[in-house]
Image (tube, rainbow, N blue to C red):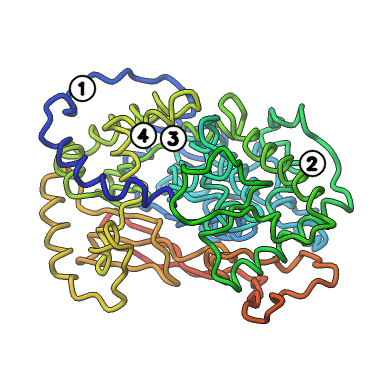
Amino acid sequence: MRQSSTRGTLLALLVVIASSSSFSLATSIPSTNDDNHEANEAVCPSSNEQCTATDVSSLSSVYVLGDLHGDVLCTVSWVNRTGLIANLFDSALISDASLPLHRRLNPASRWTWTDSRSTLVFMGDYVDKGPTSKQTVQFVRDLTLTFPNRVTALLGNHELELLRDRDARIKPDQRYASFSYASVHPGEYHNYLHDDDDITNDGQSTDALKDRTRSIDSDDRLILNLLYQATMEVYSHGAHDAIRVVPSIDPTNEGQHSTRELYAITDVIPTQHRALAKQRLEEYQSAYLNSYRSGTVLGTWLETRPILYFEEHVRTLFVHGGVHPIVGREYLKKGKESARRINEVWWEHSKEDALFDFLQNTTWGQIVYSLLTHRGNHPGYSKWETHEHVDDDPTDTEAVCAELQNMLTDMEGIDRIAVGHTPDFRVRFYCGEQFLALDSMLGRGIRATGNEYCPWPDHDMAGIPKVSRNGKYKCDDVPETCHGETVRIDSDGTVHILKL
């Protein structure tokens, strides 16, 4: 995967970064006035908030939701669990089981914030692994726009990869979204073809709607089922790395790949449907990327997510992946000010005409990438960056915690780091609660089938069995109910685990 392509050089680059005065935090970075950028400052609340501007200074609690991965039902359920928003649901629709839960919401203008001393933080990874990524992004976006001083939504590594995939220089079979694991769920594609959810809750119509609105037809339903069937065949043969979810492999790319030969997912689809599958899959993937272009509603929102958020009332730094010791000591030593500078340089380069070169060719791009992907703060992950190896019974906890504590002493005002990105069935607290691992797989897809894609409960497979032809792979059932854990961090330092 793309992450491994840079992993071998990242540490060496960071060592060079740390010794280079030309990339110090004193570097002049243009400030931004984009209203979508979330600040760490106390500012006047929106009209939906039942509080005053001074309430932020007496903050009591921060509610934190981990990775949501394309599951809008569980996203809405967990937000409702916090109790922070009144009038979230339309009372006339809430009992209508014929409607998905996210279509039973009130307009955002009717939502009100209930607790003037609390805020809400999302840890990123709203997309991938589930079939309702677009609806998840739209809902979280509506929350940030309705309560801009109360809700912070970080960027995750999956959003970063989505934004990078927009660059025309990346061939389709080299996009992150082309992998047969960890990227775009097949059930997601149809969401970008029709307009059921293309009006966001603040009344804006997504820009890409102008070019591609059409109804889903019987051929679309057929191709989706064939894609599901094809991925089951891929998994049954352990061919994850050899298959790309693309209409076809570009023959001009020969020699750009490793020694492994690549095939398109359409090569696994029966020949009588292959031409239609190629045509529809090309349409689906084009519509998907076009929905997140610079200048679109959803693309602009993702581009303006912060990489870091420091909440000084709980003295906690929130970041999706983790903090490499060199990044922490050299680039976060001024705490809140350092986080602000990293966010600003990200915002200056997040648009599609600049992002690819920023990530590939600049020091700051490597820092951003590291912050969204680093796993070394977790006990048991010391060999992850070099060998992708996880020690399920870690013996390095003492050493990892000592390194974390030494790094924190060099990061002004920061006593704790909270991350998502690294999943488990529960949230985990390490090093005397100085490190919080908060990805508890809130999305039902990743919880049930991990990095593999299977039909969800509401999908009709039209008689196609959820098992491969050789019987070696069977799709696990995706549950109808949500599971996992979230947390509330109080200003006295106490961390509470919340369940549905």
Task: Return the residue at label 4.
Answer: 360
Residue neighbourhood size for the residue with mark 1, other residues' Cα within 10 Å, grouped as few (<14), some (14–19), many (≥20): few
- Measured Cα–Cα span from mark 3 to mark 1: 36 Å
Q: Which mark is residue 310?
A: none
Which comes before the other along the chain, label 2 or label 4?
Answer: 2
Q: Secondary structure at mark 2?
A: loop
Residues 46 and 19: in front is 19
- Residue 383, given in percent of the width and then of the height, sits at 25, 63
State yes or no: discs 4 and 1 in contact (Cβ < 8 Å): no
Which dot, 4 or 1, sits closer to the camera?
Answer: 4
Residues 308 and 288: in front is 288
Q: Amino acid under label 4? A: Gln
Which dot, 3 or 2, sits closer to the camera?
Answer: 2
- Residue 288, given in percent of the width and then of the height, sits at 66, 40
- Measured Cα–Cα span from mark 4 to mark 3: 44 Å
Task: Return the residue at label 1.
Answer: 27
Residue neighbourhood size for the residue with mark 2, other residues' Cα within 10 Å, grouped as few (<14), some (14–19), many (≥20): some
Residues 276 and 418: in front is 276
431 horizontally vs 238: left or right: left
Q: Which mark is residue 194?
A: 2
Which comes before the other along the chain, label 4 or label 3?
Answer: 3
- Measured Cα–Cα span from mark 1 to mark 2: 46 Å
Q: Secondary structure at mark 3?
A: loop
Q: Amino acid under label 1? A: Thr
Residue neighbourhood size for the residue with mark 3, other residues' Cα within 10 Å, grouped as few (<14), some (14–19), many (≥20): few
Which comes before the other along the chain, label 3 or label 1?
Answer: 1
Say if residue 56 shows up in the picture. Answer: yes
Task: Return the residue at label 3.
Answer: 52
Q: Secondary structure at mark 1?
A: loop
